[in-house]
Image: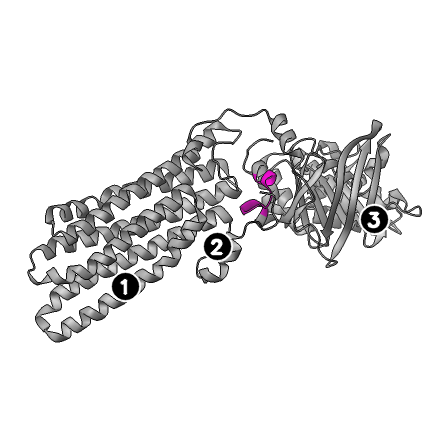
Amino acid sequence: MNTAAATPQTHKPAAGGREEFAHDITGTVGRPFLEGKNTKFFCRGVNVFYTGDKQAIYDVSVDIGRNEVIAMIGPSGCGKSTFLRCLNRMNDTIAGCRVTGEINLDGEDIHAKEQDPVLLRARVGMVFQKPNPFPKSIYDNVAYGPRLHGLAANRAELDDIVEQSLTKAGLFKEVKDRLQTPGTGLSGGQQQRLCIARTIAVSPEVILMDEPTSALDPIATATIEELIDELRQSFTICIVTHSMQQAARISQRTAYFHLGKLVEVNDTKTVFTNPQHQLTENYITGRFG
Amino acid sequence: MDMNTTQHTSHQYNQELEDARSKLMTMGGLVETQVSNAIKALLERDSSLGERVSFSDYEINTMEVAIDEECAGIIARRQPAASDLRLLITIIKIITDLERIGDEAEKIGRYAVEMTESATAGDLHSSLRHLGEHVKIMMRDTLDALARLDVKQAMQVATNDQQVDAEFDSISRQLFTRMLEDPRNIKDSLNVTWCARSMERIGDHCKNICEYVIYLVKGKDVRHTNLEQVKDEILGVSTGSNR
């Protein structure tokens, strides 16, 4: 903020700016580790390669705490979604994708041979950007997972799970009289809450959310944000979002990714008032990126 | 740390922040002039200058309102974060202190008019002269630290406030003695006390502004802390950050 700064400067192209800073990223600043206190996910030295040894994320080490909402932010292509998908081995479904490093969920290696990815994904559920209800009734959408995993002994128990999940997702009141109508007939915000209900029906421990509100209007977004805060009581939530205000509103910790590297992890309040790394500062104040 | 306001992707945003900042500096300049004119009017027994000072305060008040409104507008429309947020918070806080400095200058101006009439006040002025000079320098250094975002200087000025407080105490003691010696001195002595008090308050506001400068640059709130104790932390070369 010196006087020379008063003259408007021409902007460097974003890509140029990013390349220039890329070499500055050495390790992660802030508070990436929880020192064993309430750690849900323990990630150390995670690398992801796509076909042809193209590396998507580099040496990411971070702890994710129990009952916390951690927001992953960063410019497009920075690896935040890729990292999120590591946490329930969704990357396994992509041909040629290779993940190295250590990821432990409650002290168990999620890549261990005896680990069944289907069961892992029941423990670590996922909600996507676009609401993707099955072309089935609202009831069957929610009942699908519990049926698959055999969580209900009889119809009454299943009814119970469906009702509780829809209630937790804040949707039950709106749909209780039309549980047998198609899930695809709901509004966008309702569909997304249906997807959240479907995710929580299998009693996961962690919910991964990849831009869950980017297709929704502000009111539906607010409902889901409110829901996320309530869900935090019972679950751990990792959310990838392009909206920095959303990250600021709902998360307790924020992780900033840049060019596949984890630049900074810190308490959300600190990240948004006094970030430690210049790249984080630039991104959240709207410079470059 | 990079406090450059001109690198946002949005040029309009750059412009808005720069505009708020430059208005702050303009207001600072205006207040500084008021303070030095008020002290000059007092020491040189210039009643017309004193009158001018006491009638110019409205300009500062108007600026305070305008800058507040501008900052509120930027916060509403841009949702600033990190250093931009700190800049706006700091501006809003600093203008409050500047406005109050303006009020103190106005008071000194009014006493200057009143005291030109008094014959006995002359020898009291010498003690005010030193305090006045000190406060003027403090004001100048504060605005300097603000313009250059110089944490070291801000720290220096904030620490120097103790000297102003000590000078004020010593003037008060002198005046007490004077009042005890001869009750006819009470009216003048009280006027001088009020002026010294206003100068001391200006010093306090300068200290506040310097603390905001430290917050703006370092992100650390040093209000109500012992500056000597946090000095190393604030001026430390690196806190392990990559800035």
Report whether residue A126 is seen: yes
Q: Residue at x 82, y 38 (%)?
A: A90
Q: Nearer the viewer, residue B19 or A221?
A: B19
The amino acid type found where label 1 is placed reads Glu
Q: Are labels 1 and 2 assigned to the same chain?
A: yes
Q: Reply above or below: A37 against B87.
A: below
Where disc 3 sits, the SS reads helix
- Mark 3 vs mark 2, foreground winner is 2
The amino acid type found where label 2 is placed reads Asp
Q: Tell me the chain of label 1.
A: B
Q: Reply above or below: A91 against B126.
A: above
As drawn, the label of residue B221 is 2
As drawn, the label of residue B167 is 1
Q: Are labels 3 and 2 assigned to the same chain?
A: no
Packing grade of label 3 (10 A; few <14, some 14-19, many >=20) is many
- Report the residue marked by disc 3: A158
Q: Position of residue B17 (x, y in %)?
A: 43, 35
Q: Tell me the chain of label 3.
A: A
Where disc 1 sits, the SS reads helix
Image check: A227 left or right of A135?
left
Q: Position of residue A193 (x, y in %)?
A: 70, 41
Q: Reply above or below: B62 against B204.
A: above
Q: Residue B198's quadrant in the figure?
A: bottom left
As drawn, the label of residue B181 is none
Q: Tell me the chain of label 2.
A: B
